[in-house]
Each structure stands twice: as C-alpha cells, then as structure tokens.
Image (cartoon, grey):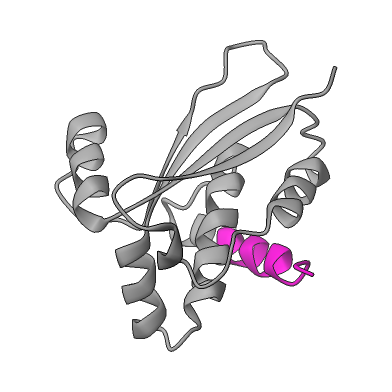
Amino acid sequence: MDNQEVNFFFEDVDQNSLDRPPNNKWLKNSLLSFSQEQFSISYIFCSDDYLLKINRDFLDHDYYTDIITFNNSEENDDLLESDIFISVDRVRENAKENSMQFSDEMDRVMIHGILHLVGYNDKTNEEQEIMTQMEDKYLALRP
C-alpha cells in the first residue's frame, strides 16, 4: 500500500499567516518525480523564535534560518519520513529583501526542503548553484 502524505501544521503562527494554502498536489508530484513513491512529510510553520530554539537545541546553531529539514526515515525503508520546519517570519523577510512575492518565496523554501530530502545539498557554491537551478525547475512546474 502506497503512503503519500504531505501534511501542514502551524506551531506558534496562525494559518492565515500564509497568503494562500500550500499546494499539496505540487509537492506530492515533486516527490514522485524523484521516484519517491512512499512519503510522509510534515511541514510545520512557525516563528523565527520557535525555529531558533530548534536550531539551538538540535543543531547547536545560534542563528535564525528559514528552514530546518529533519529526515526521520528508517534505514533501508522505502518510506521517506520528514519534519520540515519553516519560519514564516524569515520567509517573509527574505521575500522582502529579494523583492519577491511572499508566496513564491514560501514555495521556494518548501521545495528546498524536499530537495534536501532527496539528496541535494547547499554547503558549497557549486551545490548552492545546483540547488537554485533545481528550485527554479520545480517552481516552474507549479500549476
């Protein structure tokens, strides 16, 4: 039986803090395009302070970030499980700084989390360039 779930939760921010509901179908299709047929992904939208605490507690980083992706998959299991935490505050700030629509920046961050889960990294300049190209590719596939 195939498990294909993408769920959305709101920790310390209101659901109305997003300009529009997340595009569940686009996210599922993105995962399927990587031959990832079984997945249970939870997006947790939160504030800067909430994500800063997670960054400190779990990654020992003391700075704000827009996204933290936890891969909770079991080794040798076909089911991709993840909690993806996104700071609505940081995404809104980044959108403003880059003269982008908030909803477009949110979609970019959401697909960024999926790209990390399927093996893309962004530590080096070369990896960042590839990550941006992949984000752009998947953003272009939105309905």
Above or below 73: residue 122: below
Left or right of 129: which side holds 98? left
Furthest residue in direction bottom, as rendered: 99
Furthest residue in direction right, as rendered: 1
- At 57% across and 13% down in the image, what residue appears? 74
How far across and how far down the image is residue 81, in percent? 58, 26
Q: Which residues are magenta?
A: 130-143
Left or right of 135: which side holds 45? left
Above or below 4: residue 62: below
- In depth, the one of 18 and 56 nearer the eye is 18
Q: Look at the image and tell me in which quarter the C terminus lies.
A: bottom right
How far across and how far down the image is residue 133, in percent? 64, 66
Above or below 73: residue 50: below
Q: Is residue 12 visible?
A: yes
Q: Look at the image and tell me in which quarter the N terminus lies.
A: top right
Query: Total label count?
Result: 0
- At 76% across and 53% down in the image, what residue appears? 25
Above or below 137: residue 43: above
SS assignment for the magenta stretch, majority: helix
How far across and how far down the image is residue 77, in percent? 68, 13
Residue 117 inside the magenta-drawn segment: no
How far across and how far down the image is residue 95, in percent? 41, 78
The quadrant holding residue 14 is bottom left
- At 43% across and 89% down in the image, what residue appears? 99
- At 59% across and 40% down in the image, what residue appears? 7
- In depth, the one of 33 and 89 nearer the eye is 89
